[in-house]
Every structure is written in C-alpha cells, then in structure tokens.
Amino acid sequence: MVTVNEAKQLIIANTQLLEKQKCALDEALGRVLAEDVIAPISLPPFRQSSMDGYAIIHTDITQKGTPLTISGESKAGQADLPELKPGSTIRIFTGAPVPVGATAVVMQENTARENGTLTINEYPIPDGKNIRRVGQQIREGAVALGAGSLVSPGAIGFLKGMNMNEVIVHRKPKIGLLVTGDELLKAGDALVPGKIYESNSAMLAAALTNAGASEIEVKYAADDFAATAEALAALIRDNDVVLASGGISVGDYDFVGTALESLGAETIFYKVRQKPGKPLLFGKKDGKLIFALPGNPASSLVCYYEYVLPALRRMTGWSDPFLRALQLPVRYGYSFDGERDEFLKAKIEGSEVVQLDGQESFVIGSFAVADALIYLPVHQNKIEAGELVEVHLLPV
Ligand code: AMP
Ligand code: MG
C-alpha cells in the first residue's frame, strides 16, 4: 500500500514521453508543444498606429491648439508612404504603418480639422504615444512559446500571426481498455435479475477521448483467469497504456492481478491509502503502462482523474500534469474515520466548494454533476464549514 503522493510520484517516475511528431497548427488545439517555438519574425513587423488619428512629430506640439498641415494618409495595408515633414501631419488608421519621421499618433478625438489644417488639442504628447514598436509583442529569434505550453486558441492566434502553420508535439497515446465482470450487460440487452448495465467503458472512453487518446481498443473478458490474461496480453502488445476495469479486488473472481503477474508484468504499486479507489494497481510491461482500476464506477473515475490522466498528460509533454488544485472554503462540515485520504465529489458554487450527496463508490450520479474533487488527507479528517480544503478541478 502506498500513499496518494507516493502513487503520484511513482507514476511520474515511470512515465516516458512519447515520440515527437509534426502537427498542423489548425489541428493542434489541446496538444502540448514538444519543443520551444522560436519567433520567425517580429510582431509587429513594422511600426503601427494603435489609434485612428494623426501621425505627428511630437516635438512640433508646443501647446494645446497647435495647428499642422495635413499632408497625406496612411491606411491599413498601405505599402508606400510619404515621409512626415516638420509642421505637418498624416491622417492614419489603426494598424496602418507609421510614416518615417513620425514620433507619435494623436487620437482623432483630440483634434479638430478644418480645410487642410488640423488643430491638436492635446499637450504634452510623449515620444512614441499610440505607436506599436517593431517587436513590441515578440522579437524575431526569441522564444515565442516554450516546450510544455498548451496549444490554446490564444496560442494558435499568436503563432498564426507569425505565419507558423505547424508545431512539434508528442504523439497521442493508444489506449487499451479491458472490461471485466460476469454481471455486465451490453447496451440494448434486456435487464435480467443479478445483472447491471456496463457503463465504465463508455465513461472511461469519454474521458480518454477528452484527454486526446488517438485510439481506444476495448475488450471484454469474463471473470476467468485465462480469458483475462489473454485479453490483457493482447492489449498490452498493441497499445501504449492499458486500463482494466474491475477484477482487481480480493474477491475469488478478481483475476486481473494474477493475470498480470502471469504475464510477467511488474507491479509498481498495488493499493493506495485512499477512499475511494484503494485497490488501484499500477504496473508496467515492455515499457507499456498498466492501470488496473477498481470496478465501482466512482472509484474508477477518481483513479482515472488522479492517476491515469496525469500519466497520459505527462506522456504528451505536460509539465504539470495533475488536476489543477486550489484552496477553497467548504460549504459543510465533514469528518471521517480510518487511515485513508478521501476524495469527495464536489461542485464549486460561487467562491466555495460544496460536497455532493452520494459519496459511496458505487454512486456515479454525484459524479455526473461534479466539477471538482475535494482532497482530504487523513490529517484533515475533521473539517468545519468554511474551512479551506484542497480542490482538484475536473477537466471540462
Ligand atoms: P469489481 O471491482 O470487479 O469487484 O467491481 C466492483 C463493483 O463495480 C461491482 O458492483 C461491479 O458490478 C461494478 N462494476 C464493475 N465493472 C463495471 C462496469 N464496467 N460498469 C459498471 N459497473 C461495474
Ligand atoms: Mg468484478
């Protein structure tokens, strides 16, 4: 049995980055940069006006009401520009190139125009006012985004602005998923006594798709040693990561542990001092990661979010792969006995976190509306309403 923190450290220590590959920027949303991206050009590439107004030489303005002669125009996209001469001004628009000689732009609202003359109703005007400098956002040759950065919509906008259309990322993992349990019905089967509808595979597949798995191969095995071992062997051979659902407890019909052992898989840890999800097993074979998740749906999903997802993120280059954690005041007092850390399904409401009804490991309905987990280490086994607790945000 390991602690929650030991389990997390062991997972990270045993997780390797997947190979690098090129990815079209248009398809890279949600992926992580495998290498630093160096700016191929400066942004802005030329001096730009940040206002609709008039380009001036700021030293020409010696008091409010200074008149200037309007000598031309610079509009967005214009290539050939007149030079600005002392005593004159050039009409200019947002994003347009600032003419040579100009040192500032006066916003239109601070001017008055009559015939060919412009009166500037602003004084003093500092050097460079309303001018975006070359490279003010990023200089050619500088690191635009570092390795480990998430490709967000903002990142796509930033890189496209430098005519970058491809990035280097880590390959997406292929996942094998083994579902065990003689009690499980498939979708559409008639409900008969003693059986339940199988729901973990769809739940985990949804979470895996969200996390960017490239392929998910699902196999089903009866509660039988040979069938379990055979399915696991094939999944381990053909995938980067294998998840098993159920069959990892101490019941007489739990065969995942012994099947893995028979295949020569290394057990890195078995059992975590936590509730729910104690029977989690983490192992490795031929460089492939294996997570045997408890079958109870809420236990399975807690283990997925706290352990599997960070491993998948790490493999694809995330530098901080764990769920985002923050401290929030809790709505209700709560206490527990025992020696295990607890994860509670919860919802953030306003600036507090609220425990949901239905914390038992077989109850998945509370997870259906949860957007966070409260993490309570054993030493925090008695909390008062309003006390700060560690909250892990579930990915959306
Ligand atoms: P196990 O970990 O195999 O002992 O299963 C623990 C509990 O989870 C039992 O109540 C199972 O019926 C339930 N369970 C196991 N696998 C699934 C599944 N794929 N979908 C829904 N419930 C499951
Ligand atoms: Mg079972």
Image (cartoon, rainbow, N blue to C red):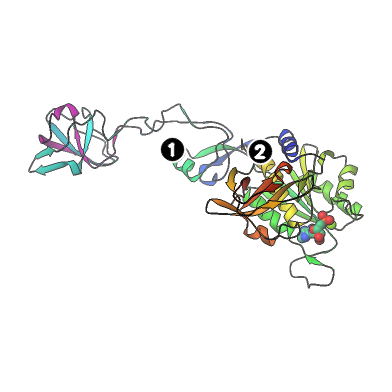
Q: Provide the secondary structure element on which disc 2 rests.
A: helix
Instruction: Report the mark closest to the observer, 1 or 2.
Output: 2
Q: Is residue 392 magenta?
A: no
For residue 239, say whether it is visible: no
Check disc 1 and report the residue beneath it: 163
Q: Tell which residue pokes out farthest to the front in this image.
A: 384
Which quadrant does ligand 1 occupy?
bottom right
Range of magenta residues:
45-74
The quarter in which the N terminus is drawn is top right
Instruction: Return the x and y of residue 116 as percentages of the image width and height.
Output: 8, 40
Q: Position of residue 242 (x, y in %)?
A: 76, 46
Residue at image mark 2: 314
Q: Report the Cα–Cα distance between label 1 and label 2.
A: 29 Å
Residue type marked 2 = Arg
Q: Quadrant of residue 220?
A: bottom right
Q: Please rate how many residues cluster around mark 2, counting C-alpha atoms within 10 Å: few if below 14, some from 14 to 19, many from 20.
A: many
Query: Looking at the image, can residue 208 be seen?
Result: yes
Q: Position of residue 121 (x, y in %)?
A: 14, 38
